[in-house]
Amino acid sequence: MSTTETAIVIGGGIAGPVTATALHKAGIAARVYEAYPGPTFGVGSGLALAPNGVAALDIIGAGDLFHAIASPVSHTQMSVGGKVLRMPDIPDVPSLKIVDRNELHRTLHDHAVATGIPFEYNKRLVSVDEDADGITAHFADGSSATADVLIGADGIRSTVRGLIDPKNPGPEYTGMIGFGAMIDNEIGLAPETMVFAFGKKAYYLYGTVGDDKIMWGANLPHKEYLTLSEARTIPAEHWLRILRETYAEDTPGGEFARKTTAANLETTGALHIMPSVPTWHRGRMVLVGDSVHAPSNSSGQGASLAIESAVQLARCLRDLPEHSAAFAAYEGLRRPRVESVTARGRKINHSKTPGPVARRMMPLLMPLLMKGMNLEKTMGAEQRYRIDWDAPVQRELAASRA
């Protein structure tokens, strides 16, 4: 029987509410502490959730809530040099779902609150104390909280990651800044369609949302690193001017940029990828979500992997007597999977910022690459992955070692 009865969850974004809700389902009382003054519903734009991530939401009772706010993507295409190529399907796998990140966060937060999870705000973690009986978190406002374990769900700039191991690496900048907007579907894009577009100067993607809207996202090459706060201090008009210049020769990217206004432009900040984190846990602390694995957005798996890891961590704490054994089992189950996805995303990321020669060659080479593309091989296992909540973790560990 588990000796873990209480948990502190640091971070109230997406991974935090899911972790706390999964812990509640596992019989562990969790409380979420967020550094911001309130829920950060205004951060981010659109994202895709893969079938494996949606299946993990079903486990915590949030699947139906998610479907109510998401749009399916039944048709995926790639656009290179003005040529639109249909991407092959993965047999017997549900479609991707596109959702507004703000709506997803709000839904997961509200579901956690309805489940009985307490949230506290203005709680910026500064230090921890551990002893044989538990761990105490100390916050910048002078308050503290004590529990059996502390879980870092505090994102790519994780404070908990540094407390676990000051030598743990931080995120790597991909050389791109993300932007997004919702615009009217004036180009007649078919329902349930998403297009991955390699423009003449930069990559972008777009997809239908509902019957009459398009959500588009730009990955703008930018040598200078800017945090989200720094990028947002720059007027939207400045970014719009650069976006319109960058995508001017692209169809329909140029039209999207021209139709986007300062009022509806979402600046999502620098795009990152996490290198392999050597130390996932120490003592009574452990990492989950982007704090420990944040693959490039090119992978299409960032949010899904965070949700999976939250559920798997709760299973391990439920089934293993000591937190140290639970943390080790959790890492053993998750590390191979998340690092495999990260490696795939890193390869795709390189293609988003090609040099001038490679950019000229892409329209010629991409159709050939598409013919040889085997999504079943590269992504089938990723998207078919399912967590068996009711199965004992010990059985899954034994199977993974066999």
Image: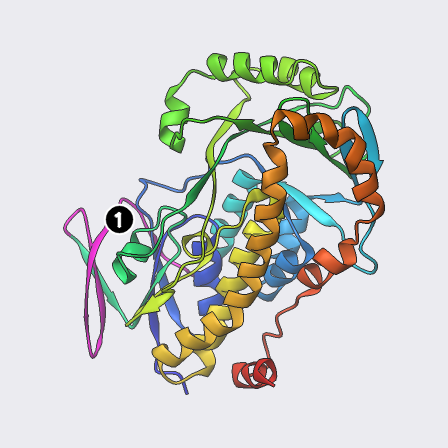
Residue 331 percent across, percent down from the top left: 46, 70
For residue 281: magenta? no
Residue under numbered circle 1: 123
- Relative to 102, is 312 above or below? below
Residue 174 percent across, percent down from the top left: 49, 38
- Relative to 30, is 70 above or below? above
Is 402 left or right of 374, judged from the image as shown? left
Residue at the outermost front position: 357
Label 1: few (<14), some (14–19) or many (≥20) C-alpha neighbours in 10 Å = many
Magenta part of the protein: which range? 114-142
Is 73 left or right of 38, judged from the image as shown? right
Is 123 left or right of 236, judged from the image as shown? left
Q: Quadrant of the C terminus?
A: bottom right
Q: Is residue 42 visible?
A: no
> Tag 1: residue type?
Lys
Q: Quadrant of residue 8?
A: bottom left
Count of numbered circles on the image: 1
Q: Residue at x 26, y 58 (%)?
A: 163
Along the line of sight, the residue nearer the viewer: 295 or 318 = 295
Residue at the outermost left position: 142
For residue 138: magenta? yes
Q: Quadrant of residue 212?
A: top right
Q: Quadrant of the N terminus?
A: bottom left
Is 213 left or right of 286, judged from the image as shown? right
Residue 177 percent across, percent down from the top left: 49, 30
Q: Residue at x 41, y 76 (%)?
A: 328
Q: Residue at x 42, y 15 (%)?
A: 235
Along the line of sight, the residue nearer the viewer: 44 or 291 = 291
